[in-house]
Amino acid sequence: MKQPRITLLGAAGEVTGSCTLIETDRARIVVDVGMVQGTPEAEQRNRQLPSIDWSSVDAIVLTHVHIDHCGRLPMTLPAGFTGPVWTTEASAALLPKVLRGSASLQQVRKHEWRNGSAPFARAIFDGDPLHLAREAMPEPPILFVNSHVSQLMGRVNTLRWGEDHEIAPGVRLRFLNAGHVLGAASVELTIGRGNDECVVLCSGDLGPQSNALHQPPMSPPRADIIVLESTNGAKERHVRPDPETQFSTILREAAAGDERVLIPTFALGRAQQIVLRLANLAKRNELYGLNVYLDSSMAVRVTDRFREHLDHLSHAVRMAFEAGEHPLEFPGLQRVTSRTQSLAIRDRRHGAVILAGAGFCDAGPILHHLAAGIDRKDCRIILAGFHPPGSVGDGLRRGAKLVEINGAVIEVHAKVDEIDGLSGHGDRDDLLTWLDGIDERPSTVILNHGTNDARAIFADAIRARIGCNVEVPGVGEEQGSRI
Ligand SMILES: [Zn+2]
């Protein structure tokens, strides 16, 4: 069997910046071209695309529209890429919104940086300097503009579940539901035919096996080589109450104290996962009189697309839509789509639940809600999912008593709660169950999207479970796949 060459061009030893190159003797395919996310310093790396000859790439395949998977796609055109981009219909519908939102944010950040008002937030621990000069932040880059997004969208092609198509000489593509967010897919590339056939499966981000909003991730029938995400590959499952029960307990207490509940939220995934749970609680009168504000225009726009892509959704949510209900709406949910509205809500002092972006607390309306409430005992912050080291969310989780938000050092008196079970990523058991579901087991698994510690722990777990070769390459290290 002729072996494809697989190279991680990003997300090798870290959780963002996804980009994988698959090469045969006749074709070059890139899966995802994402942004690095995290600190302003880390994001400087986005200025450069991976240094390959983009004019020689036959096709790019996009697994889903999270910015760490799609955020540098528009940069490939000026770099010489002339081929098509393949993705699912739902991702193609969301992609221009996400990329235009990113282009706009890049302009805003640059402008704010130049006039000294760039958003800035961090947790402060003993020994840290009290103030960090915002001027010391590197200048945010402009990576692309809207005209690049328009050109890119002219290249986008879609496949439905189950369809396959030859996207480059000798390479057929099929998408499998990944159960991660709306539109998310694993990428199955069948290379060659007959005895020479080799199936490469790039998992993309994989959702948990039990998911209230989406279908569980689909294992492929066969995969010879798997590029597998390992974001939560070191995370063991803990048996805890389901998220609705956790929310209900917290909201009962919050309502009794007329508290303001702040939830840092991502526009695609986390926002809808939480709104679905709150909608279910609303049906049972377990919001206890608290209004809920969805303070993210992008989250509002993304939520409106769910009803158009029922084949990505869980059975229960699909049935609800088909019955004419809207499982992502409920009385008491208010959509906030302007800064003026957001500031007005911030300045009211009654109990409420506010879901606001950005999910990493590094920008967006969550910053002014935190700045107004974090020093108050009648404020509560709910953390769900991953927060990068050094971020406010990570600091609050670790018990920080001080934060700096946009130049102001603020004492933390708000309560901090964590809710499990809302991650869009499967844990170690979920990922192993997904591997177990493959009838013809892989000979090689290459791990991406995880810290090196997570990859090492997860690699041992895979070797123990299915006994195959597991590799954890660095960026740019070509893996001659051994079959
Ligand atoms: Zn993702």
Image: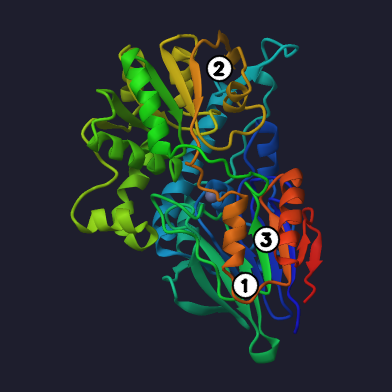
* Label 2 CB-ligand 1 distance < 8 A: no
Residue 137 vs 410, above or below: the answer is below
Q: Give the number of the disc on residue 58.
A: 1
The image quarter containing residue 324 is: bottom left
Would residue 137 appear left or right of 250 to someone viewing this image? right
SS at badge 2: loop
Screen quadrant of the N terminus: bottom right
As drawn, the residue found furthest toward the bottom would be 194
As drawn, the residue found furthest toward the left would be 324
For the residues labelled 1 and 2, the Cα–Cα distance comes to 45 Å
Mark 3 or 1: in front is: 3
SS at badge 3: strand
Residue 423 vs 224, above or below: the answer is above
Please tell me how many numbered marks the rendered image carries.
3
Dot 3 amino acid type: Thr
Q: Which residue is mark 3?
A: 20
Is residue 396 visible from the viewing direction of this image?
Answer: yes
Dot 1 amino acid type: Asp
Screen quadrant of the C terminus: bottom right
Front one among 263 and 363 = 263
Q: Residues within 10 Å of mark 3 (few under 14, many from 20)?
A: many
Q: Position of residue 225 (x, y in %)?
A: 69, 70
For the residues labelled 3 and 1, the Cα–Cα distance comes to 14 Å
Q: Position of residue 169 (x, y in %)?
A: 62, 82
Q: Position of residue 233 (x, y in %)?
A: 66, 49
The image quarter containing residue 368 is: top left
SS at badge 1: loop
Q: Give the number of the disc on residue 406.
A: 2
Dot 2 amino acid type: Asn
Q: Earlier in the sequence, mark 3 or mark 2?
A: 3
